[in-house]
Amino acid sequence: MKKVILIIFVIALSFSSCEKDDICDANTPTTPRLVISFYDFLNPSILKNVTNLKVVGEGMTSGVLINGSEITNLNSIALPLKTVGTTTTFSLTLNSGNSNPVLVDEDIIKFDYSTQELFVSRACGYKTVFTLDPINPYTHTDPIAANQKWIKFISVEKNNIDSENETHIKIFF
């Protein structure tokens, strides 16, 4: 009888140390990136691919990887914003790597925003959501000459960046 009680006690003790696995599901929404879509300036309803676009964050030596590459020809990209601080600056270079330097054009965009941390779960921790400044959401400059910007117009479509399911910024060129 004592052996049966001892066996039951050992089995109960072994199950008491089990706890739920804390693994963050890959489908759980995490900190969203800023989604930018590019449009034809002369025909604003048409999405337009950017030729050899390279995006470099301020202070970085290499470009942001978009679909595994530093240079892309897409009409939509998603860029990470800094979770520490309230600004992120990117250099967007059109025709990057072109052998004719006259065709290479760089514009600088600085995004201004506020952040808020939201608890997701024990396994995933926190995510940061962003709200673009309602008065001055971005500053657009050209490092060489202000009148040579390849980006003609920027439109803020959604100030709250809480998912990657929609376009936040439209760029017309």
Image (cartoon, rainbow, N blue to C red):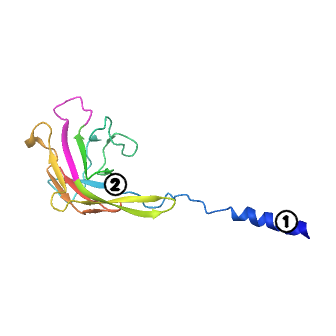
Residue 63 visible to the viewer: yes
For marks 2 and 1, give the CA distance: 56 Å
Task: Report the span colored magenta.
Answer: 96-111
Image coords of residue 18 (percent x, y): 67, 62
Depth order, front residue of 96/28 = 28
- Viewer-side label of 2, 1: 1
85 up-or-down from 100: above or below: below
Q: Which kind of residue does numbered mark 2 sit on?
A: Arg
Q: Are marks 2 and 1 in contact (CB under 8 Å)?
A: no
Q: Residues within 10 Å of mark 1 (few under 14, many from 20)?
A: few
Q: Which numbered disc covers residue 33?
A: 2
Q: Secondary structure at mark 1?
A: helix
- Look at mark 1 in the image and give the residue it sits on: 6
Whether residue 164 is visible to the viewer of this picture, yes or no, is: no
Nearest the eye: 82 or 70: 82
Q: Is residue 100 magenta?
A: yes
Q: Inspect the magenta stretch and tell me whether residue 55 lies in it.
A: no
Residue 32 as seen in the image, left or right of residue 94: right
Q: Which mark is residue 19?
A: none
**Which quadrant of the rendered structure holds the N terminus?**
bottom right
Q: Residue furthest top?
A: 99
- Ranked by sequence position, the earlier of labels 2 and 1 is 1
Residue in view at x 19 percent, y 39 percent:
106
Local packing at callout 2 (Cα closer than 10 Å; few below 14, some 14-19, many 20+) is many
Residue 143 x/y as whole percent = 15, 38
Q: Which amino acid does the dot numbered 1 rest on?
A: Leu
**Secondary structure at numbered mark 2:** loop
Query: Looking at the picture, how far across and down is residue 34, in whole percent?
Result: 30, 55
